[in-house]
Amino acid sequence: MSRRHLPPLASLRAFEAAARHRNFEKAGDELAVTASAVGQHVRALETWLRRPLFIRLPSKGVALTEIGERYAATVSQALDQLNEATARALRPETPNVLTVSTLPSFALNWLIPRLGSLKERQPHLEVRVEVSVSLTDFARENVDVAIRSGRGGYPGLRADLLMEENFFPVCSASLLGDPARPLREPADLRHHTLLHEIPEGIPDFVTWPRWLAAVGMPQIDASHGPRFSHTFLALQAAASGQGVALATNVLIGDYLDAGRLVRPFPDQVRGPHQYYLVCPEASAQRPAIAAFRQWLRDEAAAHRLAAGPG
């Protein structure tokens, strides 16, 4: 490996802060140095690169040159990775302890019921489950892996696609036996209470209006009905006979197998998101993380096989 040709770290930190703030004084406040010191570091970096990085403005602010814009983006990402690696190096060594962050409904309906099989396969692995709807900041949070619903594309992270998601109506079996209000096809939903899930922090979620439009029933009024913040709350309401909920093949849990809920008809709509397991590239092959990743991929594959096509 050839010797690295790198400028001083202090100059890079000063440049990156100044590029984010577009102001030397604000960069100095962040770094606890004077604006003059930031300017000296930036000038030293420009001399080292033999390229101008900033255009000084009369208003005391600065604007990045074209090469400065490109360089700032790369330097910022590199400093984030360095910060993450440093934070992880400072944490106590717990090689057999794994902290997993995931969505509340996924934890309750999918992950937790399967942790027994992980214990059988990896008896020495201790898993700590945290629930959150926010994106994980691996550099600042004590989290090893995260399971999220999204579209993929996570720069700097190893991402394993677990499952795609389909949405379909579910209800208590008791709702199917009312001849005055049949429930055999999507058009029959007009006669029933719709249970809505309004999850926090999940954009582009498949709601009842979107689902009805996708199956050709946009005329059904979906503006009424109880609203819930999590899938498991809406499913519990449906199991109690309070109406019809939208479930997904991922988050339905054992409701169908146990007979607590039924699908009144087979119509379903593909969701825009998939479930991914993500972790930093630098730690993806750590033994505990690698073992968890393999187990989770196996469980997801078994789930897809059991669910069948569609």
Image (cartoon, rainbow, N blue to C red):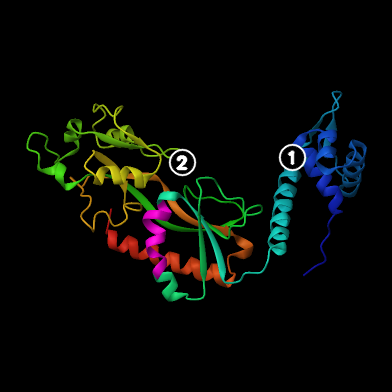
User: Mark 1 highlights which residue?
Assistant: 69
Note whether 100 is above or below 95 in the view shown: above
Q: What residue is at 86 percent from the left and 48 percent from the top? A: 11
Tell me the magenta residue range. 106-116
Left or right of 296? Residue 175 is left
Q: What residue is at 51 percent from the left and 48 percent from the top? A: 132
Q: Is residue 167 visible?
A: no
Note whether 283 is above or below 218 in the view shown: below
- Mark 2 secondary-structure assignment: loop
Q: In front: 179, or 147? A: 179
User: Mark 2 highlights which residue?
Assistant: 202
Q: Position of residue 288 (x, y in %)?
A: 55, 70
Q: Residue 66 appears in which quarter of the rendering?
A: top right
Q: Position of residue 166 (x, y in %)?
A: 32, 48
Q: Which secondary structure dominates the residues rendered in magenta?
A: helix
Q: Would you call the spot at circle 1 few (<14 residues within 10 Å), some (14-19), or many (20 or more)? A: some
Q: Position of residue 88 (x, y in %)?
A: 68, 61
